[in-house]
Amino acid sequence: MLVTGFLTVFNIETILLIVGGVIVGLIFGAIPGLSAVMAVALCLPITFGMSIINGLSLLSGLYIGAVSGGLISAILLKIPGTPSSIATTFDGHPLAKKGEAGKALGVGIVFSFLGGMLGILLLIFIAPTLAQVTIKFGFVEYLSVTFFSITMIAGLSNSVLKGFISGFTGFLLSFVGMAPIDSVQRFTFGNSQLLAGFAMLPLTIGVFAVSEVLTAAKTKHQVVTESEITEYRIKGFGFTMKEFTGQLFNYFRSALIGVGIGILPGIGGGVSNIFAYTTAKNQSKYPEKFGTGIIDGIVASETANNATVGGAFIPLLTLGIPGDSVTAVILGAFMLHGIQPSPLLFTSQGDLVYGIFAALIIAHVVFFVIEFAGLSIFVKLLRVPKYILLPLVMTLCAVGAFGVNNRVFDVISFSFFGLMGYIMTRIDLPLPPLILGFILGPNFELYLRRAFQSQQGNVFTFFSYPIANGFFIVTAITLIVAIRQNIRTAKKALKGES
């Protein structure tokens, strides 16, 4: 069937659509303020006049390109191109500032490719089985998964307290607007613009882009010094075989995390990259090095966010349930052509399903070749003076914020979040927990309320669900480990000062 799928897409027209989709996707991913959802949504009407396989091949190329392109600005500018690349900034940019931008980009590109390919292989071989497992998830199980994801906040900061303060702030921001289920207005203060709440993209680019610009504006120096840009030429992929083999366990673990989170509806790469990074840090023999510019963090983040693509397609193709916001738009492409994804799709339209698999594989190869071909160009962005580069970034971010819902209010909120992010960095509050809290807040509230409704308000019945119990136990263990690790780090710091 996979051979049949390759034969379906292996023609000049479809290949050109995939290549074009990847290139446009890379541009949308690399420019802060634009996103994979925006790229796919803008091109969705174009697919109406195409055959279903050509349309889906184009959208697949856009999806892969946008997710992969986010690492460019995350590493070079410390501004994630997409929410899927937030964790890439933690070690990618510090490594670039050490004069090893080529190495950081090389590691990111290679493991993005490998993570995506493993995600697709899992999609091909175990999609129906995994879908049958996730279909057994009810509100209690989803609540336990979301609760477990929230505990990742503890590992995103050197201080558990500061991490939870930042995460709780994100939670509060996510509650602005209409409540789920009963549509009660909350924290709107009579402002009709707040009824829809804050959008994800203005928050992300505001917190990271504007705060970075404000921080850089305090100095008269360029984005980097001469010493930081002299060693941008790389040999091969930019890293040694020893470094590659040393990351294999991190790679497989992060890929499985990415696929697992991709399968769960409504979470996506915005969580998986942070989740994988935190897991890598918590299980590392040298957690104190994370954030200083080591490849472990880049591997974890970029492997997970690309593996999430394959995971997100699993519930889409087998159950007709999108795994994230991008596959929700792709579901619209199926609907445009009168096709309803379901388990029967594998038998009734096997050539189409495996054609999509083949398109995803080809798209990964195309992005790998194109990103490596443009590597020297990307690294030369470090030479651009900040008084030229940063205003352009700010302009593109403002355009991207407006483009989400065509609202000037989103540009205003983008500016507000940028100022808030700058203040948080000044008082040493971490930014990633804020983003994670904002992403998980709506899901947590919805699943909590639904779970209470289904159990008639009896919280003790939650513990009668085996899958949920497993996640609750892992949650407790994760919290204990994170707290112990923070205490150990604090003791080392005190000893160092004394």
Image (cartoon, rainbow, N blue to C red):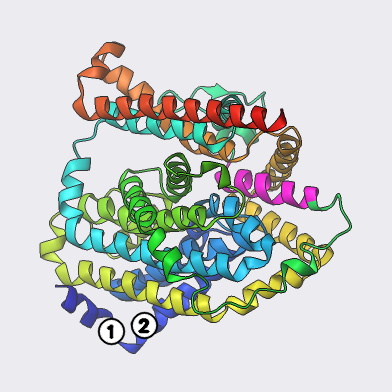
Q: Of helix, strand and loop, which mostly describes the magenta segment?
A: helix
Residue at x-position 65% and y-position 29%: 495
Please tell me which of labels 2 and 1 falls first in the chain: 1
Point out the residue furthest to the left here: 347
Q: Which residue is mark 1?
A: 10
Which of 422 and 243 lies nearest the eye of the viewer? 243
Instruction: Answer few, some or many: residues within 10 Å of disc 1's Cα (few below 14, many 20 plus, some between 14 and 19).
Output: some
Q: Horizontally, is 59 left or right of 85 in the view?
A: left
> What is the C-alpha distance between the residues marked 2 and 1?
7 Å
Task: Give the number of the disc on residue 15.
Answer: 2
In the image, which residues are magenta? 199-215
Mark 1: secondary structure: loop
Quadrant of the drawing holding the C terminus: top right
338 part of magenta stretch: no
Q: Residue at x 40, y 59 (%)?
A: 246
Decide: is 127 above or below 363.
Answer: above
Residue 136: percent from the left, percent from the top?
Answer: 18, 36
Q: Is residue 201 magenta?
A: yes
Q: Residue furthest bottom?
A: 12
Q: Position of residue 138 (x, y in %)?
A: 25, 31
Of residue 293 and residue 270, the one placed in the foreground of this image is: 293
